[in-house]
Amino acid sequence: MRLGESTVIFQGDRAGQPGYLLKSPAGQITPVRLPWPATVSLSLFEDALVVPEGIAITGKEGRDSSESDPLKFYWFAHESTAAPTILTIGATACIYNFPVASNVAFAGGRFWVAYMRPTEKEDLKLALWSWRPGDKDGRVEILDSPAYWNSHLSMAAIGERLCLAYHCEVYDENFSGMARIVTVFRKAE
């Protein structure tokens, strides 16, 4: 990832605490340790996004991350040395114990993560979670799009618009499964 003219390379230590290497244009590498709370053990580092204001990370906590562990969002503001803001995105469908969730995108002043959300009826809904730095909580919107547990979601910000693409198995009237690529476009607001 790029931050100005420098390159940011994420890495974690054996205790599950993420940090990064900052590589200058001259090739000098500086390790940077994030102010990770001692009470949080990140067992699954899912994604990271660097923006001029800070670093956003998604992952799961716990020693043995399981399907029931919710996906979390961690925000490290660049101008702060305090512990991160930690928000719960929610329960996700999982492939083994890996969450079926998109990468983090930033548009419209908000961070965005799409994921397959289990419901009480044991089916799934495609959900879109977002958070604006400074807000107390994130917000979740259920999208009217097909949902499937064995998917890979990828999201990009194009100006003030989001583009989500994923594969999904869809059943026709004969109940034969067909893989389809689904795209969702929406304004980031």
Image (cartoon, rainbow, N blue to C red):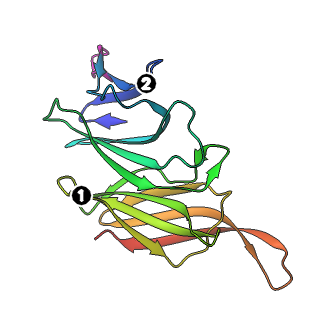
Q: How many neighbours does mark 1 have within 10 angstroms: few (below 14), some (14-19), or many (20 or more)?
A: some
Judge whether 58 appears above or below 159 on screen.
Answer: above
- State the residue position of label 2: 11
Judge whether 140 appears above or below 20 on screen.
Answer: below
Judge whether 104 appears above or below 5 on screen.
Answer: below
Residue 172 image position (x, y, % from top left): 79, 81
> SS class of the residue under badge 2?
strand
Nearer to us in this view, 33 or 124: 124
Report which quarter residue 22 is drawn in.
top left
Report which quarter residue 179 is drawn in.
bottom right
- Residue range of the region highlighted in magenta in the rendering: 22-30
- State the residue position of label 1: 132
Residue 2 image position (x, y, % from top left): 32, 36
Counting every numbered tag in the picture gives: 2
Residue 80 image position (x, y, % from top left): 14, 34
Which mark identifies residue 174?
none
Considering the image in quadrants, where does the N terminus appear? Answer: top left
Question: Going 61% across and 54% down the picture, which residue do you hit?
Answer: 152
Residue 71 image position (x, y, % from top left): 46, 48
Q: Residue at the left extreme?
A: 79
Question: Going 26% across and 27% down the picture, which residue do you hit?
Answer: 35
